[in-house]
């Protein structure tokens, strides 16, 4: 698991388009939705385990959330990506591969005006 995520997660984060986390995704058939759900939940579970075990836990959770189709996904991903250390690590990987910086999702929380 450790070696697999050590190789796969950076490859996935480098290969996704710059606007991956902000663009709307098309609707998919039921088998594709189920497969994405299973893969996403597995990645999140592995990521949570890697928070205490060796591995890239936060990045694995982020990719797992990116695979899932959840209503709160964008808010949670924005919160994770807004962490400067996480965003810097992802941008560093992408710069090494000659890719641009990821566009961050805009927080959908309502602003308070007085």
Image: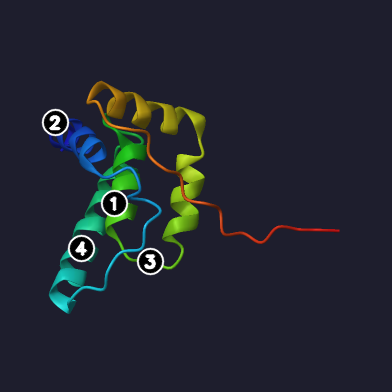
Distance from Cα at disc 1 to Cα at disc 3: 11 Å
Q: Nearer the viewer, mark 2 or mark 3?
A: 3
Q: Residue at x 43, y 33 (%)?
A: 87
Q: Secondary structure at mark 4?
A: helix
Mark 2: which secondary structure?
A: helix
Look at 35% across and 34% down and name the residue there. Answer: 52
Sequence-first tag of 2 and 4: 2
Q: Which mark is drawn over residue 36?
A: 4
Label 2 and label 3: CA atoms lie apart by: 28 Å
Which residue matches tag 2?
Answer: 3
Mark nearer the N terminus (1 vs 4) = 4
The CA span between labels 2 and 1 is 17 Å
The mark that comes first in sequence, 1 or 3, is: 1
Q: Are marks 1 and 4 in contact (CB under 8 Å)?
A: no
Q: Earlier in the sequence, mark 2 or mark 1?
A: 2
Write down the residue under mark 1.
64
Label 4 near label 2: C-beta < 8 Å?
no
Label located before the other in sequence (2 or 3): 2
Q: Which mark is residue 70?
A: 3
Inter-mark Cα distance, 1 to 4: 9 Å
Residue extending furthest toward the top: 96
Residue 112: percent from left, percent from top = 76, 58
Given contact means CB atoms under 8 Å apart, are the residues at marks 2 and 1 in contact? Answer: no
Q: Quadrant of residue 33?
A: bottom left
Q: Which quadrant: the C terminus?
A: bottom right
Instruction: Look at the numbered disc 1 and give the secondary structure of its residue.
Output: helix
For residue 80, side relative to residue 5 (left or right): right
Q: Position of residue 63 (x, y in %)?
A: 29, 47
Q: Assess disc 3: are there few (<14), some (14-19) or many (≥20) residues with their C-alpha within 10 Å of its C-alpha.
A: few
């Amino acid at each position: 698991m450790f070696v697999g995520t050590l190789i796969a997660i950076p490859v996935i984060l480098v290969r996704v388009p710059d606007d991956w986390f902000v663009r709307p995704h098309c609707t998919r058939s039921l088998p594709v939705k189920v497969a994405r759900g299973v893969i996403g939940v597995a990645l999140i579970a592995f990521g949570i385990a890697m928070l205490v075990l060796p591995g890239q836990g936060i990045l694995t959770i982020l990719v797992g959330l990116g695979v899932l189709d959840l209503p709160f996904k964008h808010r949670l991903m924005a919160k994770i990506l807004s962490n400067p250390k996480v965003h810097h690590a992802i941008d560093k990987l992408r710069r090494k591969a000659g890719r641009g910086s990821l566009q961050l999702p805009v927080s959908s929380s309502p602003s308070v005006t007085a």
